Image: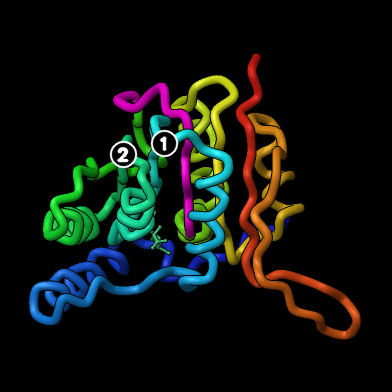
């Protein structure tokens, strides 16, 4: 399988600069910043959680950015929530947005491709756009493999891993995660038709951790 190639979206410098700007924007105008992949995808994820995840389960969002997905989950009644991101600016922004509403959500800085031994026993792991960013980094293959190993270690046996990606198709994600996870379900995403072939711009796949 071919790697995607390097891009500035795969560098921490890019995200640091971006969140510095977004923190400023939030403080000045109350603007929470970008909802990656749009509101439609978020609503589909929330509806899926409503039907499939118990509100008492622990949920970890990898590369949470402004934390809006967790904030929306909190509003839906999920209360055991944590978000991590390697950008201090993202964590500052997420804490300020959640703090304004007095929502009790834990946010912390963490590089998912580094040592993550402090995290364990998570029921549900979420990723919206973060594996995509990691796939665009320098040494992407090495980083992807470290990411997959870490996610697997975070999780309880039979835990769910929900990944939403615009860079990889469902088939490609299944291939990349097959050593540690089995395909469980997918969250339907908007489809387009081109030349008679039906495809999705974004894939949202639910995996279950393989129990060894
Ligand atoms: C496309 S944004 C998505 C943000 C958020 N998940 C959302 O849906 O709004 C990618 C995020 O991944 C974070 N990120 C990239 N590489 C990371 C890594 N190795 N460890 C932790 N966070 C990372 C970036 O800082 C950024 O917040």
Would residue 193 be found to the left or right of residue 70 on screen? right
For label 1, the SS is loop
Q: Is residue 118 magenta?
A: yes
Residue sitting nearer the eye, 149 or 35: 35
The answer to whether any part of residue 22 appears in the image is: yes
| Badge 2 element | loop
As rendered, which of 102 and 191 lies closer to the eye? 102
- Mark 1 nearby-residue class (10 Å; few <14, some 14–19, many ≥20): some
Q: Report whether 93 appears left or right of 196.
A: left
Residue 110 lies, with reference to residue 190, above or below; the image says above
Residue segment shown in magenta: 117-128
Q: Is residue 134 visible?
A: no
CA–CA distance in space, label 2 to label 1: 7 Å
In the drawing, what numbered circle is on residue 20?
none
**Image location of residue 60, percent across then percent down:** 39, 39
Please identify the quarter of the rendering in which residue 17 is found. Answer: bottom left
Ligand 1 in which quarter: bottom left
Task: Please identify the quadrant where the C terminus is shown.
Answer: top right
Front residue of 165 and 14:
165
**Which residue appears at 47% of the width and 46% of the height?**
126
Position above or below: 2 against 207: below
> Taking 189 as reference, is 89 left or right?
left
> What residue lies at 72% left-to-right and 45% top-to-bottom?
174
What is the tally of numbered marks visible in this picture?
Answer: 2
Residue at the spot of label 2: 79
Query: Residue 55 — which label?
Result: 1
Residue 97 is situated, as x and y percent measured from the top left of the image, at 18, 61
Q: How far from the left and from the top, in percent, is residue 180?
A: 64, 29
Residue 2 falls in which quadrant of the image? bottom right
Q: Nearer the viewer, residue 162 or 71?
A: 71
Residue at figure coordinates x 16%, y 69% from the top left = 23
């Amino acid at each position: 399988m071919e790697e995607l190639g390097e891009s500035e979206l795969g560098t921490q410098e890019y995200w640091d600069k971006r969140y510095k700007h977004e923190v400023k924007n939030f403080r000045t105008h109350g603007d929470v910043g970008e909802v990656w992949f749009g509101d439609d995808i978020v609503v589909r994820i929330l509806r899926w959680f409503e039907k499939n995840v118990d509100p008492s389960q622990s949920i970890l969002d990898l590369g949470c950015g402004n934390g809006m997905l967790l904030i929306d989950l909190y509003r839906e009644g999920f209360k055991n929530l944590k978000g991590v991101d390697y950008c201090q600016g993202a964590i500052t922004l997420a804490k300020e947005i959640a703090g304004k509403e007095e929502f009790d959500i834990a946010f912390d800085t963490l590089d998912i491709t580094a040592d993550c031994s402090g995290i364990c026993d998570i029921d549900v792991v979420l990723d919206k756009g973060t594996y995509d960013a990691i796939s665009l980094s320098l040494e992407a293959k090495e980083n992807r493999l470290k990411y997959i190993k870490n996610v697997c270690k975070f999780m309880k046996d039979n835990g769910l891993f929900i990944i939403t990606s615009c860079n990889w198709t469902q088939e490609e994600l299944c291939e990349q995660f097959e050593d540690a996870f089995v395909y469980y379900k997918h969250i339907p995403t908007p489809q387009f038709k081109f030349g008679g072939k039906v495809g999705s711009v974004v894939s949202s796949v639910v995996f279950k951790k393989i129990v060894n």
